[in-house]
Image (tube, rainbow, N blue to C red):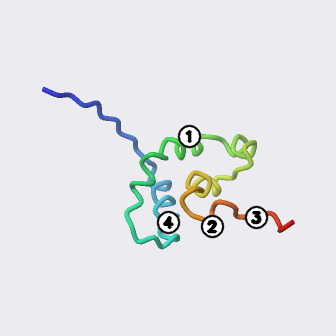
Amino acid sequence: MREDSLQMTFIRPGLRSRIDLFFAEKGQGFNPAVYIRPRLDSILRLEAMSDAELAAFGLTREDILPFVFEDCFAETMHPNPPPDA
């Protein structure tokens, strides 16, 4: 008999709604679970930080999702691109 370890992670309802809204605003028309699952630990780790700890990284709570998914969407990679030199 094969036994697989099961790891369950519970997401607070408010955080789940923010994640869903983040992807809905992107209008991608796909199930974002493929993107969320491998990054969930990072999201939860950042969410657990205090506002002061986030600020030390140059982030606000609203910046967490764009930061974690910055490589997925071109417009989130560099919200304030440097001016052309």
If the image is split into quadrants, where does the N terminus sit? top left
Label placed on residue 45: 1
Label placed on residue 75: 2
Residue furthest left in the image:
1
**Pair 4/3: label in front:** 3
Label placed on residue 81: 3
**The image quarter in which residue 53 lies:** top right
Residue furthest front in the image:
85
Q: Nearer the viewer, residue 18 or 84?
A: 84
Q: Position of residue 83 (x, y in %)?
A: 83, 67
If the image is split into quadrants, where does the C terminus sit? bottom right
Q: Residues within 10 Å of mark 3 (few under 14, many from 20)?
A: few
Q: Residues within 10 Å of mark 4 (few under 14, many from 20)?
A: few
**Pair 2/4: label in front:** 2
Q: Which residue is mark 4?
A: 21
Q: Is residue 32 left or right of residue 42?
A: left
Q: Amino acid at mark 4?
A: Leu
